[in-house]
Image (cartoon, rainbow, N blue to C red):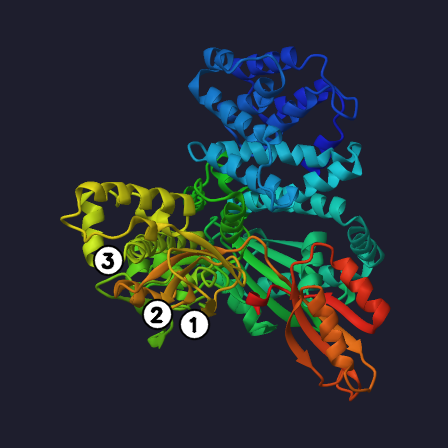
Amino acid sequence: MEFFDTLKEIIEPHKAINVLDSLAKMTPKIYDALDIAQKYHDGQRRKSGEPYIIHPICVACIIAFYGGDEAMICSALLHDVVEDTMCDIDLIKHKFGEDVANLVDALTKITEIRKEEFTSGNSSQKLIISALSFRKILVAAIDDPRALVIKISDRLHNMLTLEVLSREKQIRISEETLVVYAPIAHRLGISSIKNELEDKSFNYIFPQEYEKIQTYLKENKQPLSFKLNYFIDKLTRLLLNNGFLDSDFCIESRVKRPYSIYLKMQRKGVSIDEILDLLAVRIIVQSPLECYKILGIIHLEFKPIVSRFKDYIALPKENGYQTIHTTIFDESSVYEIQIRTFDMHKSAEYGIAAHWKYKSGGIIPSLEWLHNLQYQNNTIEEFYELVKNDLYQEDIIVFSPDGDTYSLPVGAVVLDFAYAIHSVLGDNAKEAYVNNQKVSLLQILKSGDIVRIVTGKQSVPKSTWVDAVKTSRAKSHLKLQRQNRIREIEKKSAVNILSTIFSKNHKTFERYLSIKGFDSSLYRVSKDIQFLQDMKNKIKESFNTEFSFFAKFRMNMLKLKEIKLENFLIYTNGHVNEVLFDYCCQPKYGDEILAIITGQKVVVHHKLCDKLNELIDSGVPMVFVQWSKKIKTAFKVIVALEDKKGTLANFLNTLAKKDCNVIGVSYLGYKSRFSTHCEILFETDLKDIRFLKELLMRKYKVIEFSSLKDAYQN
């Protein structure tokens, strides 16, 4: 956009002020904000060496260009003074009032992200920065979404002047822009900012790919322009011949943007030469009815690609976007055609800002997504995944039986639709019908589907479906449902563990625990060995005055022993000599587990196993179990053995001497060929596995030596 190019070239404060003066009515408050910004930023310089004050003035120019009000322009001018200078927020409040002070405060809280410590040890710094940025921006904007517009304008000017920074910083800022700021601009409907942010980020992250696309477009500029102009002439004649006047419509043309082309190349796995629809035409008219008339004229004249047709006028996007999209063939070329009104065009370019800039009608972008993104109780990783689901994906439109429309991400299932209507409907959904056909609650929806939900009297557990749903609302509810269910299971299993230790009936023992007030944190017994020990001792002490209630028994029978078997630690006052998995659930290492005891055998189940829950309700004896921290790692070795008696036995004996547990031997040949190659799977807890590998390679002809996943993950 020409305006953005103008801002990029500004290197003197007075030129920035002149641009601002041309875009906004310079009120006394704006002059005061300009004076304070100049005073507190005096002496500060950007990395380029230019006076820092140019940046806030240019951000204010962007806000003014998009029709921002006086408070927004003042806040843009002052957005860095509290964060980067000695200026206090109380001064802002005194000089400019609550409105400006709250906006500046929100923007200051957003920028504080850079000072936060990254406490998550399992995530990359990139993910954490992106997630924390999301959280700060969204939380700050909940009360006043204008903060979002100022913040993406701030980021836009930074992207316009990013060339002076180091390559490392360029990439980091561009990646954050692509995954945080561009999607927010999209949700606000401001496509002109979104497009600029995406292309600038693409240029810095993948400069070679960007240059290849730009080179192709430059080298083919003449033939592409010729094709576009030829097609526009054809369209113009077609519309004039069908009753339209020159003044009734405007036709714009463009070649698709570099980032859009790159995404299409990646999705389809093709080169730029193989992309058919590089060329796009936009027809802008006065009224919605004329949009449909032109659509009819075009479809009667050219062959449409039906699968590419989208009617966003009848069914607007959640961000307020309204346009008819169709793609047609003409003389072996493919053209994307957009048809919209002049008001729709303003809304598409300026989004939520169109209502400030043009005081236009039309659909105001929904900000419901903003209020849905409050996941303060989630980990950073969970928060990031939930937000990505809501911000990044393209939408589909589905209908309720009454004709109400709901926007859902591509890939959403029926249960997402149920939760989009109401959490109670999602919790109690029993079955569903899509287009009058009975389907699973996990049926993937398509645009245009009509969905009816049938509820049951009770909530049906669906917590294991959390990975199948797409929307953050559905995921949050299923995770909460899962947490509540696990808490209930843990409490019941705690009663069984304690009643097993004290050799009592679980129902009787449960009543006793309740009477004594021991049941408030009972769920911790099944997962915290120290809490179990403390609870056991409290109960034992209470027996001193309760022998009339409990039969006398020897207290030394209550001492818990730690037993290590396989990859498990078991605590019990009984005897255990074997650990088994039942056929029903087969938990992986790290899954939440519980264990029942039968004789001297312990059977391990996943906490959410249906069979286990039936057994818990029946009062089955249970013991405390947890995964051992000393996990044996599984390895695969393929070895070429001599064709003589005892060779395999000698190899296995070498492993046994190094305390390796052989779990599989295969003499099926190597890579489908009969040979003396043998594949052996084994487990070991050796810390220095290199020593074992070198030993085997010295003594035998080892073809392959590789680590496997934990045996319990197979």
Residue 273 horizontal/vertical position (percent):
78, 66
Q: Residue at x 55, y 58 (%)?
A: 339
Residue 673 horizontal/vertical position (percent):
78, 87
Frontmost of labels 2 and 3 is 3
In this rendering, is residue 207 above or below 683? above
User: Label 2: few (<14), some or many (≥20) within 10 Å?
Assistant: few
- Specify whether residue 275 is in view: no
Q: Quadrant of the N terminus?
A: top right
| Mark 2, residue position | 611
User: Label 3: few (<14), some or many (≥20) within 10 Å?
Assistant: some
Frontmost of labels 2 and 1 is 1
Secondary element type, mark 2: helix
In space, the residues marked 2 and 1 are separated at their CA atoms by 10 Å
Is residue 667 left or right of 423 when viewed as pictured? Answer: right
In space, the residues marked 3 and 1 are separated at their CA atoms by 25 Å
Contact between marks 2 and 1 (CB within 8 A): the answer is: yes
- What is the three-letter code of the residue carrying label 3? Lys
Q: Nearer the viewer, residue 134 or 158?
A: 134
